[in-house]
Amino acid sequence: MKALFSLPPTVWLLGLVSLFNDAASDMIYPLVPLYLASVLMAGPKALGIIEGVAEATGSLLKLFSGVLADKTRSTKIWVVGGYSLAALGRPLLALAASWPMVLALRFADRVGKGLRSSPRDALLALSIPPERRGLAFGLHRAMDNAGAVIGPLVAAWLLARHMPIRDILMWTLVPGVIAVGLALFIHEPEHARPAQKPAFSWTLQGFPPAFKRYLLVLALFTLGNASNMFLLLRAREMGLPEYQIPLLWALVSFTAMLFSTPLSALSDRFGRTRLIVSGWAVYGLFYLFLGLNGNVQWLLWPLFAFYGLFMAATEGAEKALVADFAPRELLGTAYGWFNLTAGIMLLPASMLFGWLWQSFNPVTAFSFAAGCALLAALLLKFWVVPKSGIEA
């Protein structure tokens, strides 16, 4: 706790910004399908187009913004701009008269996420000494997950009070503005001026071989990490009542919120690789058990809490490991590659998972995902060799 409260103000500010931003974002996330169907009379096809375009755009921009942050030697401007764009776009959904307008606004929201994510991660890494990176990233993920718990609960409470969906969308302006206001107070750390501006390279020149291997292993793991919607679909298929589905996912975010900080902090003492390998192994076991489980509904609750532990153990440590590998002057670009790899693989992962489920059965799909995770864990342990000072 002493180490936690001695973290720099920038770390806490970034955590609070993520908390308020995610509270706003997760207030509308479960409402968008309802809004499209009940207000704009659009169907699943429109929802698929909207989310597909939005997520693909966000993934590509994460690399672009990371490279620009390194070239301009400034991270704050991208962080503030990204959060501002999202804060303005969300409440405007209430004024949308057709699904193409929703597409444009969701596109703007994901552009904001793409612009801020990599510079924010670089800013966090630059603000903390290497021996406390796990703790800092863990705290950030904990506060981010706290927002993911608060947002849906607030939305559910407002719906229970019979507030129209349009009004709820407008209310997202409040936490969004608070997030931007807090971001303005963030202090930009000193950037060492390199001899020349870092040049972008599609072949990752300037990065150590271990970082390149790390990205390849991350891509393999993500190939088995399909959309979380499949987990909820599996729970529904097993007979869980619909009203309990949001509560089941809230349990995941709540567990991740509680354990992200202490588990990520362990990576500062015992090594990033050990913690990530353990987390990926937990993921593999979770998918195996969920796929093989028949209709034992009560097991879903401990299983999904188990999944929250995977998120808590890996989300912060994975990002801290990027900073351990990457040169300081290329941190933005490094997080750009990391976020791009993790994001762009979600599309083939979800398509493959859905094909295996529909063509064969859920057990085949979940077993494939578990196999990818366990193989990635082995490769991370024995093939991705960290540089001296991280861990063997």
Image (spheres, rainbow, N blue to C red):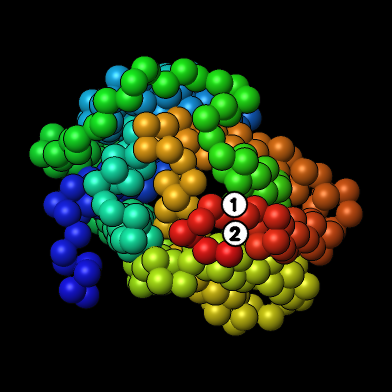
Give SS at disc 2. helix
Please name the residue shown 65% across and 57% down the image. 380
Left or right of 246? Residue 273 is right
Please name the residue shown 46% across and 72% down the image. 270
Residue 102: image location, x then y, percent: 43, 25
Q: What residue is pinned by disc 2?
A: 232
Give SS at disc 1. helix
Three-letter code, disc 1:
Met
Please name the residue shown 51% across and 56% down the image. 388
Between 174 and 274, the one lying in front of the other is 274
Left or right of 243? Residue 170 is left
Q: Crowding at label 2, few (<14), some or many (≥20) Cα neighbours within 10 Å?
A: some
Q: What residue is pinned by disc 1?
A: 229
Find the distance from the CA under tag 2 to the CA under tag 1: 5 Å
Residue 360: image location, x then y, percent: 89, 54
Between 259 and 156, the one lying in front of the other is 259
94 shown above or below 315: above
89 shown above or below 276: above
* On-image quarter of the N terminus: bottom left
Residue 199: image location, x then y, percent: 46, 18
Q: Are marks 2 and 1 in contact (CB under 8 Å)?
A: yes
* On-image quarter of the C terminus: bottom right
65 shown above or below 340: above
Three-letter code, disc 2:
Leu
Please name the residue shown 83% across and 50% down the image. 356
Between 117 and 147, the one lying in front of the other is 117
Left or right of 283? Residue 4 is left
Can you tell which mark lies on residue 42?
none
Residue 390: image location, x then y, percent: 48, 59
Q: Is residue 6 visible?
A: yes
